[in-house]
Image (spheres, grey):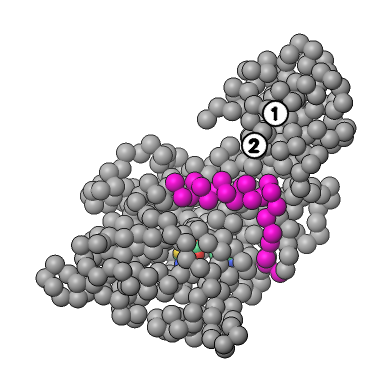
Amino acid sequence: MRLSRSFLPTLKENPAEAQIVSHRLMLRAGLIRQTASGIYAWLPAGLKVLRNISQIVREEQDRVDAQEVLMPTLQSADLWRRSGRYDAYGPEMLRIQDRHKRELLYGPTNEEMVTDLFGQSVKSYKDLPQVLYHIQWKFRDEMRPRFGVMRGREFLMKDAYSFDVDYASAVATYRRMMLAYLRTFQRLGVRAVPMRADTGPIGGELSHEFLILAPTGESGVFYDAALEDQDWLDEPVDTSSPEALEAFFNRVTTPYAATDEMHDTAAWDAVPDAQKREGRGVEVGHIFYFGTKYTESMGVSVSGADGAQFFPEMGSYGIGVSRLAGAIIEACHDENGIIWPDSVAPFRAAILNLKSGDALCDEVCEQIYAKAPEAFLYDDRSERAGVKFADADLMGHPWQIVVGPRSAKEGRVELKRRATGERQELSVDEALALVLAG
Ligand code: 5CA
């Protein structure tokens, strides 16, 4: 994208309404704009981030055999009356009437709808297990929307729902999903620690939250450092084996980890001091096992091997996709701006033309840009070099390719790595190879 022609409205000043760093940087870097309280429009660079996050989430869901669907945002109130949650959900639910005075709602979550969809088509134990997910907008009329996309009213969630024949199989599905989550967050360039959690209005008996450490997080967190350095991407867990899944689950859940709500001081005292990590965390995912709560209340049963009807066991698994854009910034920034992990950055590199209008500089920049126009943000504006450097730092591209008249004469450019500040002079081809690798 050429910066001179793009809709990338950066701000020099800190917007007064933004209290936390990710909100400030998302507004200043031109990623989002608020359109109503707790409701945001995603501008071109922000949308690229949201898509990159969604794609990684999708690939890791697919890897554990979850199947993508797309359910609507609007749901019928009758569906929620069947589970008994229509009245129980309270004022967080946005309730709507259509022209025929039929009651609808803007979905805050999809347990009811997916259970109904499943019940319409699946009649036999032979068709289990099933895991369905979608990446869809939700609405929760939060009492205090704040911190930008971190606690919005309309927000993008990946929500998955599983149906299994029995407890053992449901627990295996839950553990598989836990592995998918650890891989997802690792690929997103952040470390999210799973912690035992309260189940809240979703209900159920087994639940874990995934928290990214950030000083502005809403929960206090306590955990054992043993949870910090595990690499889950290449971990050979045989996800078809319940025993392998159990061993994996025990490894992840044995070291101490809890939010302040679930904190157990006696267990914490037993963790060696050198291993103790304490801070604040942002919840970016939450998984639940709740057995037959919805299949039973909604009357959705299938026939078993013995011919008798039974209620499938369910779980649900959420990731805050739009919240993650903010949470990643909370974890990855410095005083100059965002430092995007390579996997989610809207552009791999900025091309900074230090002398726009100079025939040679323009030619070198155009030559680089033509190699991969979608990967680069080409700063072709006739601005001062200082402005271009500051904007590139603010927007947080993993690399900056700096093209100035002196080095351009020798066919060379300066390559800066945003995360470390490290600079090196390279030929155009060497720089391209580094930037476009992986
Ligand atoms: N049905 C279950 C799992 S699919 C569910 O709704 N779980 S949840 O309530 O925990 O939400 C899942 C994730 O959505 C949370 O972990 C959080 O990352 C994100 N989320 C929840 N509320 C908001 C909000 N107001 N703004 C942004 N993200 C949110």
Q: Nearer the viewer, residue 66 or 140?
A: 66
Mark nearer the N terminus (2 vs 1): 1
Q: Nearer the viewer, residue 223 or 36?
A: 36
CA separation, marks 2 and 1?
9 Å
Magenta segment: 37-59
The quadrant in which residue 357 appears is top right
Residue corresponding to mark 1: 369
Q: Quadrant of the N terminus?
A: top right
Q: Label 1: how many residues lie within 10 Å, few (<14), some (14-19) or many (20+)?
A: many
Residue at 67% over, 67% down: 38
Q: Position of residue 331 (x, y in %)?
A: 61, 47
Q: Is residue 358 above or below residue 384?
A: above
At mark 2, the secondary structure is loop
User: Callout 1, which amino acid?
Assistant: Tyr
Please tell me how many numbered marks the rendered image carries.
2
Q: Position of residue 171 (x, y in %)?
A: 29, 60
Q: Position of residue 10 (x, y in %)?
A: 79, 47
User: Callout 2, which amino acid?
Assistant: Glu
Is residue 184 located in the magenta-colored stretch of the structure?
A: no
User: Which dot marks residue 106?
Assistant: none
Residue corresponding to mark 2: 374
Q: Is residue 25 above or below residue 96?
A: above
Q: Label 2: how many residues lie within 10 Å, few (<14), some (14-19) or many (20+)?
A: few
Q: Main secondary structure of the magenta part?
A: helix
Q: Nearer the viewer, residue 335 or 15?
A: 15
Q: Position of residue 251 (x, y in %)?
A: 33, 48
Residue 73 in view of the camera: yes
Residue at 19% over, 72% down: 303
Is residue 49 located in the magenta-colored stretch of the structure?
A: yes
